[in-house]
Amino acid sequence: QVQLVESEGGLVQPGGSLRLSCAASGSIFSINVMGWYRRAPGKERELVADITSGGNTNYLDSVKGRFTISRDNAQKTVYLQMNSLKPEDTAVYYCNAYIQLYNGVTGRFWGQGTQVTVSS
């Protein structure tokens, strides 16, 4: 009923930039919070950033000042602009959204994950 489709990640040199996008589709009535999580090898999943439908944002301390989350409500898309990337940003990044469907069902949905590797 709902799909979250992420853009491809990639290999980036330290100090480089990358923008991820995630588009939601399906029988969507409304989307509340949208966000990005990541899981690095051997580590637990962590919230990188999220954004409410009103534009309020929240960031992991280690990415503040380097990453920017934004969204286009009309396009049901969330973006993550990542600048000044560091090797420790290497992880699989997952899009997440709290969605209400037209049938009244609400739920938390996930993208398929995209690999971001920061290495020289």
Image (cartoon, grey):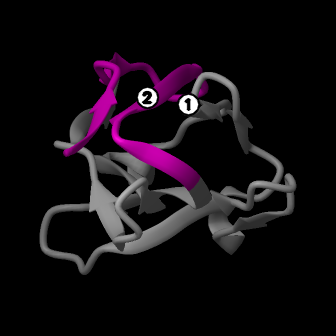
Say which element carries label 2. strand
C-alpha distance separating marks 2 and 1: 4 Å
Figure quadrant of the N terminus: top left
Say which element carries label 1. strand
Which residue is labeled 2 in the image?
23
Q: Is residue 8 above or below residue 53?
A: above
Q: Amino acid at mark 2?
A: Ala
Q: Is residue 43 magenta?
A: no
Q: Amino acid at mark 1?
A: Thr
Query: Looking at the image, which is closer to me, 12 or 75?
Result: 75
Main SS of the magenta segment? strand
Mark sitting on residue 77: 1
Q: Residue at x 32, y 51 (%)?
A: 94
Is mark 2 in CB contact (under 8 Å) with mark 1?
yes
**Disc 2 packing (10 Å; few <14; some 14–19; many ≥20):** some
Which of disc 1 and disc 2 is earlier in sequence? 2
Query: Looking at the image, which is closer to me, 20 or 60?
Result: 20
